[in-house]
Amino acid sequence: MSSDGAGHHRGPGSGLSRPTVSRLPGYLRALSALARAGTVRVSSTDLAGHTGVSSAVLRRDLSSLGQLGRRGVGYPVAALQQAISRALGLVEDQPVVLVGAGHLGSALAGYAGFGERGMRLCAVLDADPRLVGERRGSVVVRPLEELEGSVAESGARLAIMAVPAGVAQTVADRLVAAGIRGLLNFAPVDLVVPRGVTVRAVDLSTELQILAFHQAELRQ
Amino acid sequence: MSSDGAGHHRGPGSGLSRPTVSRLPGYLRALSALARAGTVRVSSTDLAGHTGVSSAVLRRDLSSLGQLGRRGVGYPVAALQQAISRALGLVEDQPVVLVGAGHLGSALAGYAGFGERGMRLCAVLDADPRLVGERRGSVVVRPLEELEGSVAESGARLAIMAVPAGVAQTVADRLVAAGIRGLLNFAPVDLVVPRGVTVRAVDLSTELQILAFHQAELRQ
DNA sequence: TAGATTGTTAATCGATTAACAATC
DNA sequence: TAGATTGTTAATCGATTAACAATC
């Protein structure tokens, strides 16, 4: 499940609806693939085909970012990438802190698409002293005690939590107190955070249960 | 991001809206916690408080499953768990196949909430011969060649993909051909599947980008 | 009876869709 | 000019909200 802790209304300056924001990363991914393949121009029909939305939805979403295309021609790939990145607040490298260096944390740290999309992993922390000092991605695991220091020195506003459910709320509290404003939570717990902090949750069993529903529905 | 490959309309027999289905697993998780704590009865206001939705949404969602509560009293916890599980198609253990035994696959296989919620990990497969034979969760890693056999002998309809992006589509094709009807994909690729197969996608950078947007919005 | 709480209604709000005029 | 494709409009559709009658 992806729950949205804050943001029950549109942001004042942005004018982007929640569904639009949730689709933009998908467009960005498809555009990266097109750019790698050397494509310089794309129509709404083409791009929609790569992302699983209708061309009407795509044009509506893009038009809310400004007049990015040319009628009769299509959209320039590079300019579109820039415009979407800017709309998502990815103009410069966003430092991100990761808490938890177990299997899940290791997988997340090693994720290649990280740097490609305006994000930079600046610290990995873990409570287990046996993991401290090991490499994860491009950084070395630090003890959990250095959480506050890591957030402060990097200026990170975003954090990923790959910790056991039992300690998730405590870790979240410390991250928020240290200045984190966006949390991506992989622990199967509903975190309580102050207003102004956004939580997104990824939970395996939630996803599987939604899948089970669709599958059961088709059997009928 | 959680994209829904199929199901662009309500299922005929179910009468559950998509937003309702996506919230049910959250209710189930909160109810499990309440049951563990010995609570036998809960009001819509209480349960809503544990799940981050309004009490009006909660009552509306639950009423679409039937008349489960009693006015002036509230909802019985145990009966509610059963009703939601049944609505999600979790009446009996769902066998699930996992492809990929790397860091991410290992984390997923070790996930405790698996069996608690009507799911059973029945096979783990990997292309790397060095991983074959190792334990992951309650099962032993098998070579990728045994994918079709694993699906057939378990009767699994659901599969989890924790494989590199480059092979994701190929693996998906094989799983679908073997009889899988629901795919949970962790690779950053938009999978193409036939009608009747549901894909849900979990992508780290998508989630981070949505988070970045909210965080940037708050700064303005 | 009095208080509490559900299930449901009606009104509001927002997103999607289809179509097309504007424009390259 | 003719063909293609965007940006935008108007209509449809669906979800949320607030309020309250029904009921324990």
Image (cartoon, coloured by chain):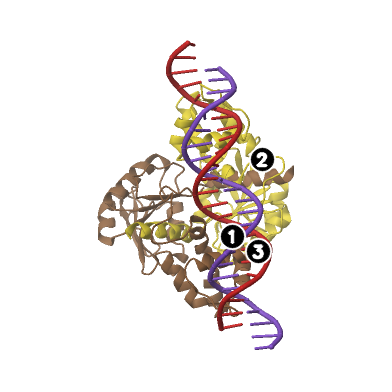
Chain colours: A brown, B yellow, C red, D purple
Q: Which residue is pictured at 73% across the width and 49% down the height? A: B152
Mark 3 falls within which chain? B
Q: Which residue is pictured at 48% across the width and 59% down the height? A: A21
Mark 1 falls within which chain? B
The tag on residue B129 is: 1
Residue A70 at what x, y percent from top left? 55, 78
Badge 3 element: helix
1 or 3: tag closer to the N-terminus: 1
Task: Tell me if mark 2 has few (under 14), some (14-19) or many (20+) residues whose alpha carbon lies within 10 angstroms of its own.
Answer: few
Q: Please, what is the three-letter code of the amino acid marked with disc 1?
A: Pro
2 or 3: tag closer to the N-terminus: 2
Q: Please, what is the three-letter code of the amino acid marked with disc 3?
A: Thr
Give the residue pinned by disc 3.
B170
Residue B61 image-quadrant placement: top right
Badge 2 element: loop
The tag on residue B15 is: 2
Task: Tell me if mark 1 has few (under 14), some (14-19) or many (20+) residues whose alpha carbon lies within 10 angstroms of its own.
Answer: few
Is B195 on the left or on the right of A45, as rendered?
Answer: right
Alpha carbon separation for disc pair 1 and 2: 46 Å
1 or 2: tag closer to the N-terminus: 2
Which residue is nearer to you in this view: B189 or A62? A62
Residue A40 at what x, y percent from top left? 54, 80
Q: Are marks 1 and 2 in contact (CB under 8 Å)?
A: no
Closest to the camera, between mark 1 and mark 2, is: 2
The tag on residue B96 is: none
Residue A128 at what x, y percent from top left? 35, 48
Residue B171 image-quadrant placement: bottom right
Is A45 on the left or on the right of B74, as rendered?
Answer: right
Residue A193 at what x, y percent from top left? 36, 44
Mark 2 falls within which chain? B
